[in-house]
Image (cartoon, rainbow, N blue to C red):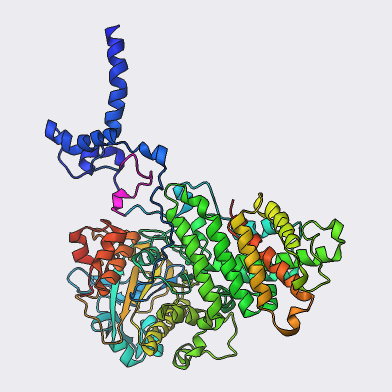
Amino acid sequence: MAKNKKEIPMWAKTGHAKPVTRRDFLSAGIIPFAASIAVPNWMSLIIGQNANAQTAISCPLPESLIPFVTLNLAGGAAMASNYVPMNSGREPVSSYTKLGLGNNQVPIEREFGNAPFAGMNNGVLISKMLTGIRAQANADTLSKTAFIAIPCDSQNDTSTNKFDVSGAITKAGLQGTNLPNLGRANTRSGIRQESAIIAPPAPLVVSSYTALLSSIGYSATLGRNLNQTQKNSLAKLMSNLNSSQSRKLASIRGATGVKNVLDCAGIKNVDIVEKGASIVDPRQNTSFSGVWGLNANTAANNRELIFGSMVYNSLIGQAGVSNLELGGYDYHDNTRTTGDTRDQDAGVTIGRVLQSASVIGKPVMIYVISDGSVFSGDSQDRNAPWQGDRGSNGVAYLFYFDPNGRPATSDYQIGNFTDNQAADPAFVTGANPELAAAAVFANWCQANKRMALFDKVAGRILDADQLSKVIKVA
Amino acid sequence: MKIVKTLTLWIPISALLVVGFNNCGQSNFESSLDLSSLGIQNDEMDSEKLGLPYALLSAEQTLNSMLSVTNVGTANTAIINEYNTRYGALAGGNDLSMANSPVMLGSTSLAGEVCNSLVTAEKAATAETRNFFGSVDFAVSVGSITDSGFNSSVRGMARSFWGRNETADELSFLQEYKLEFIAALTGTALTQVASTSNLITATCAAMLSSLDAISY
């Protein structure tokens, strides 16, 4: 996508015409250069770079922003065969025979306002994701949810697609009061997707509920042998020791931010240890427990307890972004059965997240992604089996629930499909997961009525014209 | 000869001019990170990308380091269990900014198990043959631990865990913790000898999981 920088002259990169006059050269930097000689930055070599380094720690306060949950369907899910992607005129493309849906007269089931999903065939809903969603989210919740699809070509069966937006959203200010971002895989994003725009801070990998529970306190010997006051003192000691030992970073250029991260982690732990572990338990909310089917005896490695705990802590602001992941979506086994089962499972999870937000009374954005997609044989069958990988017909989903009513949107799709039954690569987000992720981030900023955050975090990754095409949240 | 003199004058000036023409471009006096093509503000936090001369120990490195600097050597079942429980919270890489709250709490809890093993081993040895706690009498209650005995243990741990002596600030923090630890004991706990082991174990865990022990 990007041109080789060596091919672009410096003056072109700055957006100016080629400098030819004395005035052009002056405006290109001779004056600041002269100033830098007269009052050189070399003074910093003498006085140091951190003469103004903060002596007091300024830990960022969490902003009041819409909670964000990502669901990664690892393996390449048939997203384009649950939601029915449309062309640029929002009409069906000429055929859906490679998408396992037959000709272009696919029965449509409208949901989330007007979004088209694969509808009834012989009395059964083709879209199993929608089936799963409807099984968990009630009519009131669905009536308060908006939906946006983002067709995007992505690489099959890989963790290298830059779909993850947790870094951008964290940078924009969505941070947990007691926990960092939560993830499921031991990667920087917490899922098997790479970060778009900016890498997130390290997430807590929630391999089991115990991992979440124990992450906010001392366990084993220290947990058993120290009383609560002694634990509080230990947290304070750790904060003091680490703050003292991180001072060496203050003298290093560019390390102030890292020092702050370390110092703030210690300060936060003092507060966390005092509060105790029970604050992360979703089972203290009966309605929430009901959504996920949890009770006191639910095993710590139960998936619904793990997902429910992550979502609960994100929704109440205790954690930042929650990145959930479901495996088994590389399901092209020449049947439709495996894929349908997985799709319905994904729908169940999406429905539970939506219903969770409803019972807690918080808005939420759910971003559903995968790595690549699947194709069927060129078939008129509306339930044709999956035969192989086909990333060109990838689609990401964005759900936006607001307890006050369905958020207004100008469209249900960003970009379009072509008659090749694939995402249109000519559209800005059609062939670039990172730009698709940027579009999602832009819509999240817009939903928060804080577009300045997009400029601050993502800069010019999308220009004004592109933003006007990808922002669908009113 | 004139050409040589001219070149001697103009080559350095030309070099300075090239360096100085940066009005709209990235300043040569700023960080070397190039995010300008995306228009992203340059406030990178990744210590590896920043080129900081310090790095965090990964989960595996943390465990190995703790076992090594304490001379515990081999992880017992309790250590392995705690490591497995905390694995997801411990650092997945070497970027120093990954040291978030769970990494720090997890490291301290893991260190608690390693130190428990260390204290158990040292208690079984005679005072003269101990590596760290020769100045501590584990047969008396915590109130009987002298300042000099406590400080001597701190010195031994600092040299082994941090590769240096403790600073005055660090010693002050640790002594303050000792006082708070004892003040938090009530009733029979104040006179139980186990409280001595608990204090030494907690102090050891704090030092073994502090930034200088889990980074390099």
Q: Does the rendering let one see residue A431?
A: no
Where's residue A139, x and y in %? 32, 92
Q: Could you tell me which residue is drawn at 28 percent across and 69 percent down?
A: A445
The picture quadrant where one finds residue A103 is bottom left
Q: Does the rendering let one see residue A170?
A: yes
Where's residue A217, x and y in %? 58, 75
Write the start and end of the magenta stretch as one range: B27-40
Quick check: A194 above or below A253?
below
Quick check: A358 above or below A159?
below
In the image, is residue A167 part of the stretch drawn in magenta? Answer: no
Quarter of the C terminus of chain A within the rendering? bottom left
**Nearer-the-camera pick, A365 or A313:** A313
In the image, is residue B37 part of the stretch drawn in magenta? Answer: yes
Q: Could you tell me which residue is drawn at 49 percent across and 85 percent down?
A: A282
Magenta segment, principal secondary structure? loop
The picture quadrant where one finds residue A122 is bottom left
Quick check: A290 above or below B44?
below
